[in-house]
Amino acid sequence: MGILLLTAALYQRQVAGQEARRRTMQSQLVAMRESAARLMELEQKPQAVLARMRSSEEFLGTVEQALAGAGVARDRWQDSIPQPLARVTGTDYQRQATLLYFDALNLEQVAAFVCELSRLDTALGVSSLGLTARDAGFDVEIAVSYRVYSPRRE
């Protein structure tokens, strides 16, 4: 009788342990499914990237706002030249860059403009900056770019 009770107690302990493992594995499975669903969702929509091209008016309006916010006179902005879309290697994104040209800015104005541009639109980034020293400051060439979601078609 004692052996039977001992065997029953051991069996009950084993069953309880397996039940606890089952509950743990089930909660892990739920967490994994949620993580997989989140990954699938992230693959479907780009983060901090535009799904579309900006219109010239929209982009240039942001540049004008950044100039005003940085305290740079509008007449210092000489030209803007959009560049062709370029594929970001190994991704489903393309980079749209626009070259902006300014005359006679000091370094404080350049920094203020770049900071204001970034504050106004976090998707915009400066991909290159060129400075040419002049008597009245610097002539500045800034390449401002953003990414556009554009899946590769293979």
Image (spheres, rainbow, N blue to C red):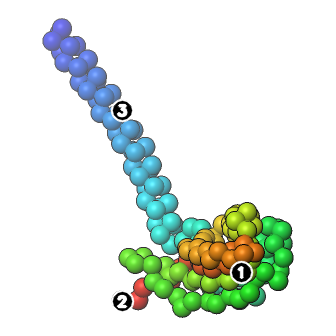
Is residue 58 at least partly visible in the picture? no
Which residue appears at 28% of the width and 23% of the height? 12
Q: Residue 111 location, x and y as percent? A: 69, 64
Amino acid at pointer 1: Phe
| Residue in the image at 45% along x and 49% along y | 31
Which residue carries the number 3 mark? 20
**Marks 2 & 3, CB-CB < 8 Å contact:** no
Mark 2 or 1: the one toward you: 1
* Quadrant containing the C terminus in the rendered view: bottom left
Q: Secondary structure at mark 1?
A: strand
Q: Position of residue 25 (x, y in %)?
A: 36, 42
Mark 2–mark 1 Cα distance, whole angstroms, equals 41 Å
Mark pair 2, 3: CA separation: 48 Å
Q: Earlier in the sequence, mark 3 or mark 1?
A: 3
Name the amino acid, label 2.
Glu
The secondary structure type at the circle numbered 2 is loop
Front residue (pair 40, 115): 115
Q: Quadrant of the N terminus?
A: top left
Q: Which residue position is annotated with label 1? A: 102
Mark 3 residue type = Ala
Location of residue 55 in the rendering, given as x and y in whole percent from the top left corner: 70, 88
Instruction: State the residue position of label 2.
Output: 154
Front in this rendered view, residue 121 or 113: 113
Q: Residue at x 51, y 66 (%)?
A: 41
